[in-house]
Amino acid sequence: MSGRTVSLFPGTQLLYDGDLVEVTEFDGAGVTIRSCRTGQFSAVRIGDLAARARLAGGTDPDAGDGPDPGLVLAGLTGGAARRGR
């Protein structure tokens, strides 16, 4: 892991399990996401999201022009997660 971070907040779009999703809400250790394709909402654990999600937008982390695959949430406090910051 390189130490790069990604800020997550409501409205952030990610690729999750091959589907474009949007973060809609934080709730403790979980995140609610909405599929942009189907409109379906899902609740996932932050750890699961961090392990399986990629940023949408087509940056190539190996080329050094964007964040690493996955999400680094180490700096996110419990209160910030609930507020979506």
Image (spheres, helix red, strand yellow):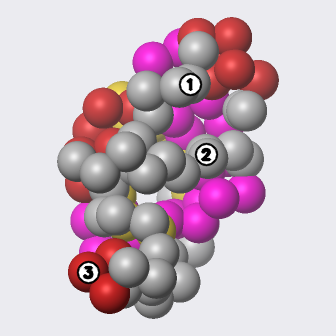
Disc 1 designates what residue? 76
Q: Position of residue 79 (x, y in %)?
A: 68, 11
Which of labels 3 and 1 is toward the front?
3
Q: CA distance from mark 3 to mark 2?
A: 21 Å
- Residue 66, compared with residue 25, is above or below; it is below
The dot on residue 8 is 2
Q: CA distance from mark 3 to mark 1?
A: 25 Å
- Say which label, 3 or 1, has the lower sequence index: 3
Q: Residue, x 59% and y 15% (percent of image)?
A: 77
Question: What count of labels does the image hold?
Answer: 3
Disc 2, SS: loop
Q: Position of residue 26 (x, y in %)?
A: 62, 29
The dot on residue 62 is 3
Task: Let me know if residue 19 appears in the view.
Answer: no
* Amino acid bearing label 1: Leu
Asked whether, in this view, residue 44 is left or right of residue 52, the answer is right
- Say which label, 1 or 2, has the lower sequence index: 2
**Are circles 1 and 2 on residues that touch, CB within 8 Å?**
yes
Which of labels 3 and 2 is toward the front?
3
Q: Which residues make up the magenta segment?
A: 11-32
Does the segment drawn in magenta span residue 56?
no
- Check disc 1: other Cα within 10 Å, few if <14, some if 14-19, many if 20+: some
- Say which label, 3 or 2, has the lower sequence index: 2
Q: Residue, x 63% and y 23% (percent of image)?
A: 81
